[in-house]
Image (tube, rainbow, N blue to C red):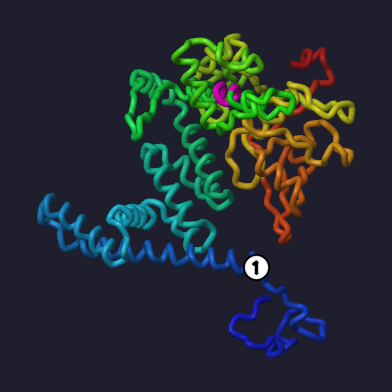
C-alpha cells in the first residue's frame, strides 16, 4: 500500500485493511518505493500528460479548422500553417516539432484510439506512439487491420528500440505477398553517388539491395576487426603498435583499398580470405513449391527482415558465403558438447545466434552476428557448452553481465528466453526471435515412414 497524502502512516486504522493481523508498526509493513520506483512513476505521469496534451492539441486543431470549412483549398492550407505557427509559438518549439505534434495528435485521436488509450494509461511512452504512427501510416489501409492490434501489444511489451525493430518485421511479414513485386521495382533504382563534404572529405553512397549492402558491411567490419586485433597483439612489431586508427577509420581504409586497388595486397595476411556472410532463414518446403510457399512464413535475412522468395532461393542455391537455416514444422536440432570443451563448435555458435537473431540484452537490437557467445553460467562455475547455456551478447551487455550485480539466467524450458534480474530487484525477460524445435520420430515407421 502507498499512502498518498498522509503525513504519518500511523493515521491508518488497521481495521480498515483487509487481512490485517495486528502488525505493531504499520510503517514497517508497508512497501516503500525505491529510487527506481520514483523514476518510473514520473515516467508514467509523463506519458499520461503527453496523451492529454495530444488530445488538447487535436481539439485546438479541429476548432481552428472549423472556421475554414467551405472557404476553399487555399484558405485551408493557410489556416493549417497558421495553426502550426500558433502551436509552435505558444509552446516555444520549432514549427517542425509543432507539425509533428499535430500529425501525432490527429493520428491517435482519429485512427489509432487504442494507442492513445495505452499512452493515457502510462503503458507506453510518447516515443512508442511516434514510432507506431510513423510506421503504421506507411502500411496500405487495407492491411492495417492485420497489424494495429498486434502492434499495440508489442508497444506495451517492448522497449522503444526493440519495438521499432519488431514492428518493422511485423509490417514486412504482412506485406510479404507483395514484397517480390515491390523489390523488383526498387532494384531498378540502384545507384552509386558521391556527396562532397568539407575539408576535402566526402561520402560515397551506394543504394543497392540490402542483402548485398549488409554483406559488404559485414565483410569490411570483419577485416577491420582482424587488423585492429592484430595491432593489439603483444607479439607484433613496434611499427604495428604505432597504428592508432579507430575501427571506423580502419573500415573506411579497407573499403578504399578494396575499391581502388581491387586487391587485398595491402591488407594483413591474417585478414585474407574473409568473405561476406549473411544468414538466410527459409522454410525448406517453400524452396520446392510455390503453392506451399504461400502458406509458409516468408524467408528472412538476419538484421534485414523478409525478402522475396526468388531471392531466397537464389541465396540458398549453394553459394558458400550464405549460411542456410532450413526450418521444418516437426524437426530441428539440439547440440551440446557439455564440459568437453569451452569454445562451442561452429554449428552450435550459428544455431545460438540464429535463435536469438540479436543481442539478448534488454532492449538491445545489435545483430547476433556481431555479438559474442556467452556462457550464461560461467564455464569456470561449471556451466556447460550447450544450447541451454549459451546466448549472444554484445560486448557492452557481456561486460555488465559478468562485472556487475545483475543476475542473468536462461529460463528453463523457454527455448532460450533470458531473465535479467537488476540490482534493484526488477526482472526483465528477453525472448529470442525464434524457437528451436526438437527431433520427433513416429514410433510406427511401417505406418508413418522414417523420420524426416
The picture places residue 288, in percent across and down from the top left corner, at 58, 12
- Where residue 368 sits, quadrant-wise, is top right
Against 177, residue 364 (above or below) is below
Question: Nearest the camera: 222 or 235?
Answer: 235
Answer left or right for 20 relative to 112: right
- Quadrant assignment for the N terminus: bottom right
Residue at the spot x=30%, y=52% of the render? 96
Can residue 263 be seen in this snapshot? yes
Could you tell me how many numbered marks the image carries?
1
Residue drawn at point x = 47 percent, y = 32 percent: 172
Can you tell which quarter of the image residue 247 is in?
top right
Q: Position of residue 194 (x, y in %)?
A: 34, 25
Compared with 440, 434 (above or below) is below
Q: Is residue 221 magenta?
A: yes
| Residue 280 seen in the current view | no
Choose between 282 and 296: the one closer to the eye: 282
Q: Residues within 10 Å of mark 1 (few under 14, many from 20)?
A: few
* In-front residue for pair 349/387: 349
**Residue 246 vertical placement versus 407 (above, below):** above
Is 30 drawn above or below residue 65 in the view shown?
A: below
What are the residue bounds of the magenta stretch?
A: 218-223
Residue under pointer 1:
35
Q: Residue at x 39, y 25 (%)?
A: 204
Q: Is residue 186 left or right of residue 449?
A: left
Magenta: main secondary structure equals: helix
Pinpoint residue 253: horizontal percent, then vertical percent.
50, 23
Q: Is residue 18 left or right of residue 363?
A: right
Dot 1 lies on which element? helix
Q: Would residue 285 be counted in the magenta stretch?
A: no
Residue drawn at 82 percent across, 40 percent down: 378
* Figure quadrant of the C terminus: top right
Q: Position of residue 136 (x, y in %)?
A: 41, 43
Amino acid at each position: 500500500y502507498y499512502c498518498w497524502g498522509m503525513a504519518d502512516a500511523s493515521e491508518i486504522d488497521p481495521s480498515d485493511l483487509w487481512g490485517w493481523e495486528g502488525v505493531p508498526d504499520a510503517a514497517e509493513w508497508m512497501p516503500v518505493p525505491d529510487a527506481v520506483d520514483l523514476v518510473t512513476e514520473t515516467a508514467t505521469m509523463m506519458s499520461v500528460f503527453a496523451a492529454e496534451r495530444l488530445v488538447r492539441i487535436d481539439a485546438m486543431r479541429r476548432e481552428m479548422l472549423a472556421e475554414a470549412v467551405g472557404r476553399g483549398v487555399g484558405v485551408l492550407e493557410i489556416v493549417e500553417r497558421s495553426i502550426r505557427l500558433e502551436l509552435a509559438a505558444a509552446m516555444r518549439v520549432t514549427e517542425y516539432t509543432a507539425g509533428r505534434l499535430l500529425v501525432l495528435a490527429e493520428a491517435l485521436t482519429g485512427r489509432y484510439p487504442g494507442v492513445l488509450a495505452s499512452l493515457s494509461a502510462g503503458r507506453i511512452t510518447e516515443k512508442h506512439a511516434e514510432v507506431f504512427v510513423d510506421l503504421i501510416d506507411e502500411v496500405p489501409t487495407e492491411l492495417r487491420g492485420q497489424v494495429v492490434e498486434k502492434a499495440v501489444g508489442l508497444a506495451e511489451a517492448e522497449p522503444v528500440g526493440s519495438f521499432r525493430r519488431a514492428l518493422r518485421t511485423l509490417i514486412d511479414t504482412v506485406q510479404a505477398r507483395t514484397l517480390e513485386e515491390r523489390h523488383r521495382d526498387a532494384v531498378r533504382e540502384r545507384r552509386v553517388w558521391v556527396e562532397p563534404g568539407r575539408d576535402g572529405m566526402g561520402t560515397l553512397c551506394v543504394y543497392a539491395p540490402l542483402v548485398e549492402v549488409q554483406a559488404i558491411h559485414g565483410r569490411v567490419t570483419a577485416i577491420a576487426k582482424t587488423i585492429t586485433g592484430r595491432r593489439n597483439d603483444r607479439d607484433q612489431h613496434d611499427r604495428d603498435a604505432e597504428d592508432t586508427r579507430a575501427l571506423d577509420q580502419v573500415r573506411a581504409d579497407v573499403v578504399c583499398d578494396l575499391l581502388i586497388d581491387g586487391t587485398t595486397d595491402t591488407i594483413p595476411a591474417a585478414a585474407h580470405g574473409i568473405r561476406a556472410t549473411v544468414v538466410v532463414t527459409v522454410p525448406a518446403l517453400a524452396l520446392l513449391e510455390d503453392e506451399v510457399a504461400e502458406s509458409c512464413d516468408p524467408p528472412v535475412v538476419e538484421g534485414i527482415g523478409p525478402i522475396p522468395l526468388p531471392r531466397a532461393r537464389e541465396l540458398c542455391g549453394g553459394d558458400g558465403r550464405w549460411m542456410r537455416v532450413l526450418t521444418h514444422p516437426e524437426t530441428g536440432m539440439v547440440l551440446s558438447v557439455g564440459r568437453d570443451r569451452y569454445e562451442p563448435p561452429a554449428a552450435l555458435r550459428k544455431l545460438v545466434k540464429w535463435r536469438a537473431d540479436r543481442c539478448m540484452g534488454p532492449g538491445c537490437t545489435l545483430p547476433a552476428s556481431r555479438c559474442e557467445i556467452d556462457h550464461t553460467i560461467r564455464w569456470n562455475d561449471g556451466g556447460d557448452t550447450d544450447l541451454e547455456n549459451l546466448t549472444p551478447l554484445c560486448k557492452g551487455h557481456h561486460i555488465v553481465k559478468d562485472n556487475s550485480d545483475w543476475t542473468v539466467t536462461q529460463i528453463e524450458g523457454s527455448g532460450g528466453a533470458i531473465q535479467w534480474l537488476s540490482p534493484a530487484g526488477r526482472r526483465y525477460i528477453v525472448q529470442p526471435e525464434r524457437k528451436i524445435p526438437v527431433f520427433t520420430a513416429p514410433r510406427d515407421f511401417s505406418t508413418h515412414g522414417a523420420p524426416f
